[in-house]
Every structure is written in structure tokens, then in C-alpha cells.
């Protein structure tokens, strides 16, 4: 079992649950088998183990996951989204994917130092900033139901893990790992040909996707203040995330495609246009008089 835990590289809580979560973990003959992302998602350690005992809190955790999955449609989040993306469009499998925008263990890293904002961010701040940038929307009020529900869900995916506040960057322990291939060695022209081969079926020649697949550039995509608007980040994310269910790009392909995708027009980010009116920055969130 120890070997499985080392091989998996996941935090101890997954290992401590591995008899339940990864039934093959008990058999030494199968020790070297690594779980696929789909198996991890299906294992759902939180729901299986803890939700039923969490009462009302469990309901909020479930609500948070629903919002992460259907951010553009859910009545609590819809007013704050300004494009065609749900959180799960980038945080695959509602953030349960082990590497593509993973939320597993994320809550252990906060409060964390954020070089972009030059301040210490709480998990709540980090969530709300993704509404402004990646979702090109308006920052929901601190303490609002949508914010607290998402925090409850993301925090539930760190249940039992040790704290490890991040003094360098506001990212969790399974954040995307940058590639050694860099944008200055990339070719947008090679990227265009690769996109036509590997991406166009789902995201379209015009990059606008369809009802099943999200837009990758243009007004309904992430704005230029989003993490993925940086080709280095996008390349690293593509390497582990796309093509969906068969992430098979080489590092060079990933960075070429990233530079091509990000060479297109997308919304400009101006902070003042994404903050709510001053009086709505935060709310008192108690329900009783
Ligand atoms: C366009 C893609 C995209 C969308 C949509 C998006 N995010 Fe993110 N988000 C990112 C990227 C990229 C990062 C940096 C993560 C990394 O380095 O692994 C990030 C980081 C985060 C983090 C910090 C993760 C960590 O490892 O510390 C949280 C929390 C987060 N996002 C929440 C959300 C929520 C909630 C939503 C929906 C309201 C959302 N994001 C929508 C791309 C996106
Ligand atoms: C089989 C269909 C499919 C293929 C092929 C595919 N994608 Fe995706 N892509 C998706 C879906 C679906 C999502 C949203 C994930 C979700 O909701 O689970 C997504 C999300 C994305 C996102 C983040 C959200 C956004 O729209 O900005 C980017 C960027 C992206 N894909 C780029 C690519 C690139 C580049 C390729 C080619 C290397 C590619 N995809 C291949 C289906 C696909």
C-alpha cells in the first residue's frame, strides 16, 4: 500500500481511503497500476465518505459542485459570468481531475502569497478572481452564497490533507506544471495546422465551439487577464487536458497550439469593469435576524 501511495504521488488522505477508493490498492500484483483521471473522478472520496455525515454543510458542498459544473446556467452564478465558460471548462471533472486545474488539495495552500496581485489571497479571493478573469464576469460579493458554496466544495476536496500554505504563488499542490518548451520557441503556423487536426472537431475552425464544447477565443472566451491568456500557462494546461479524454500532445505541440489559440482576439481585462459597486463588495451572510 505504501508503494501505491508513493507511485500515485497523491496526498495521504487518498491513500488512507485507498481501500475504498482504489479497490485494486490492496492487491500487490496490481500495485503499479495508476488510476486514470476518470477513475479518480468516479471514486469521489468526499461524497462516498463524508457528505452523508455533513448534514446542511453537505448540502452546500453539493450546491458548490453544481455551480462549478454549470456556472453559466446556475441562477446563483449566472449573473456573475460574462462568457460561455463554466469553472469545469478548465478545472476538468469539476476540479477532481488530478492535474488539469485540479482542486484536490487546493484549499491547503491558502491564504497564499499572490505575485500578480502583490498581496495575500484567501481561497475565497482566488475563486472570485476567476469569475472576473477566466469567466470574464463580475466579482461576486465576499460572503455571498455563490462564493461560500464554491469554497465549501473546493475545501471538501482537501478534507484530511495537511495544510501547506504557499508563500510563493497562489496555487495549490496539484497546480499545472509549466513545460520546458517556451512560447519563444513556438510557431503559431505549426499551431494552426495542429489545431486543424486535433481541436477543430470540437472547438470549430472559428474557435467558437458549440453547445457541447466551449469557445477558445473571441468575445465568449476567457479575457486577456486570465491565467490561460498567458501562452506558457495554456500550453502547460493543454498538455494535461486536451484533446479531451486523450491528452496526447507533445510539449512542442502544446506550446505551438497555445501560441496559435492565444493569437486571436479576446476580451480586454480592465479591473474596474469587473468589480461590483463598492457597496456590494461584501455582504453579511447570516440568515437569522
Ligand atoms: C479559462 C479557464 C478557467 C476557468 C473558466 C476558471 N478557471 Fe480557475 N483557474 C484557471 C487557471 C489556469 C488557474 C491556475 C491553476 C493552476 O496553475 O493549476 C486557475 C486557478 C484557480 C484556483 C486556484 C487553484 C489552485 O491550485 O490554487 C481556484 C480556486 C479557481 N481557479 C477557481 C475557479 C472557479 C471557482 C471558477 C469558476 C467560477 C474558475 N476557476 C474558472 C483557469 C480557469
Ligand atoms: C472531443 C472534443 C474536444 C477536443 C478534440 C478538444 N477539446 Fe478542448 N474542450 C472540450 C470540452 C468539452 C471542454 C470543456 C471541458 C468540460 O466541460 O468538461 C474543453 C475545454 C477547452 C479549453 C478551456 C476552455 C475554453 O474554451 O477556453 C481550451 C482552451 C481547449 N479546450 C482547447 C483545446 C485545444 C487547443 C484542443 C486541441 C489540442 C482541444 N481543446 C481539443 C472538448 C474538446
Image: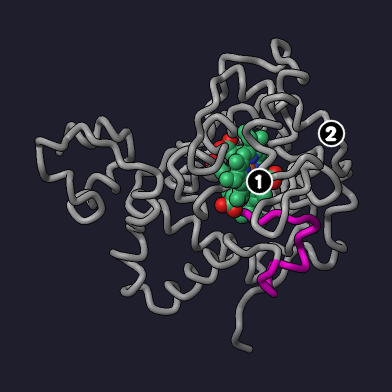
Magenta residues (range): 73-89
Q: Please provide percent x and percent y for residue 2.
A: 16, 35
Looking at the rendering, in which quadrant would you find the C terminus? bottom right
Q: Please provide percent x and percent y for residue 87.
A: 62, 54
Q: Is residue 22 visible?
A: yes
Local SS, label 1: helix
Q: Residue furthest left?
A: 28
Q: Please provide percent x and percent y for residue 5.
A: 24, 36
- Crowding at dot 1, Cα within 10 Å, few <14 / some 14-19 / many 20+, comes out as some
For the residues labelled 1 and 2, the Cα–Cα distance comes to 17 Å
Q: Is mark 2 within 8 Å of ligand 2?
A: no
Q: Nearer the viewer, mark 1 or mark 2?
A: 1
Image coloring type: one colour
Q: Is mark 1 within 8 Å of ligand 2?
A: yes
- Looking at the image, which is closer to me, 174 or 211? 211
What secondary structure is the stretch in magenta mostly built from?
loop
The residue that disc 1 covers is 202
- Looking at the image, which is closer to me, 206 or 238? 206
The residue that disc 2 covers is 264
The answer to whether the residues at label 1 and label 2 have Cβ atoms under 8 Å apart is: no
Q: Is residue 104 left or right of residue 89?
A: left
Choose top left, top right, bottom left or bottom right for residue 74.
bottom right
Looking at the rendering, in which quadrant would you find the N terminus? top left
Where does ligand 2 appear, by image quarter?
top right
Q: Residue furthest top?
A: 185
Q: Residue at x 75, y 56 (%)?
A: 84
Q: Residue furthest bottom?
A: 289
- Looking at the image, which is closer to me, 152 or 95? 95
Amino acid at each position: 500500500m505504501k508503494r501505491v501511495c508513493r507511485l500515485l504521488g497523491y496526498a495521504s488522505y487518498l491513500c488512507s481511503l485507498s481501500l475504498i477508493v482504489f479497490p485494486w490498492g490492496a492487491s500487490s500484483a496490481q500495485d503499479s497500476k495508476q488510476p486514470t483521471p476518470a477513475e479518480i473522478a468516479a471514486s469521489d472520496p468526499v461524497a462516498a465518505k463524508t457528505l452523508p455525515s455533513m448534514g446542511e454543510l453537505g448540502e452546500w458542498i453539493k450546491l458548490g459542485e453544481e455551480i462549478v459544473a454549470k456556472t453559466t446556467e446556475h441562477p446563483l452564478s449566472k449573473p456573475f459570468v460574462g462568457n460561455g465558460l463554466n469553472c469545469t471548462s478548465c478545472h476538468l471533472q469539476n476540479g477532481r481531475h488530478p492535474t488539469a486545474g485540479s482542486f484536490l488539495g487546493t484549499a491547503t495552500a491558502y491564504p497564499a502569497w499572490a505575485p500578480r496581485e502583490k498581496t495575500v489571497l484567501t481561497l475565497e479571493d482566488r475563486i472570485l478572481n476567476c469569475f472576473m478573469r477566466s469567466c470574464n464576469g463580475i466579482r461576486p460579493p465576499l460572503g455571498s452564497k455563490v462564493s461560500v458554496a464554491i469554497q465549501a466544495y473546493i475545501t471538501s476536496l482537501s478534507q484530511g490533507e495537511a495544510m501547506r500554505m504557499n508563500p510563493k504563488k497562489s496555487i495549490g499542490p496539484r497546480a499545472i506544471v509549466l513545460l520546458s518548451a517556451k512560447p519563444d520557441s513556438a510557431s503559431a503556423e505549426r499551431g494552426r495546422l495542429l489545431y486543424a487536426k486535433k481541436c477543430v472537431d470540437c472547438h470549430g475552425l472559428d474557435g467558437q465551439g458549440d453547445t457541447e464544447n466551449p469557445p477558445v477565443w473571441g468575445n465568449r472566451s476567457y479575457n486577456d487577464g486570465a491565467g490561460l491568456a498567458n501562452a506558457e500557462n495554456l500550453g502547460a494546461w493543454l498538455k494535461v487536458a486536451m484533446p479531451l479524454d486523450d491528452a496526447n500532445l507533445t510539449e512542442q505541440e502544446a506550446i505551438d497550439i497555445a501560441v496559435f489559440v492565444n493569437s486571436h482576439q479576446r476580451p480586454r481585462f480592465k479591473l474596474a469593469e469587473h468589480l461590483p459597486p463598492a457597496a456590494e463588495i461584501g455582504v453579511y451572510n447570516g440568515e437569522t435576524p
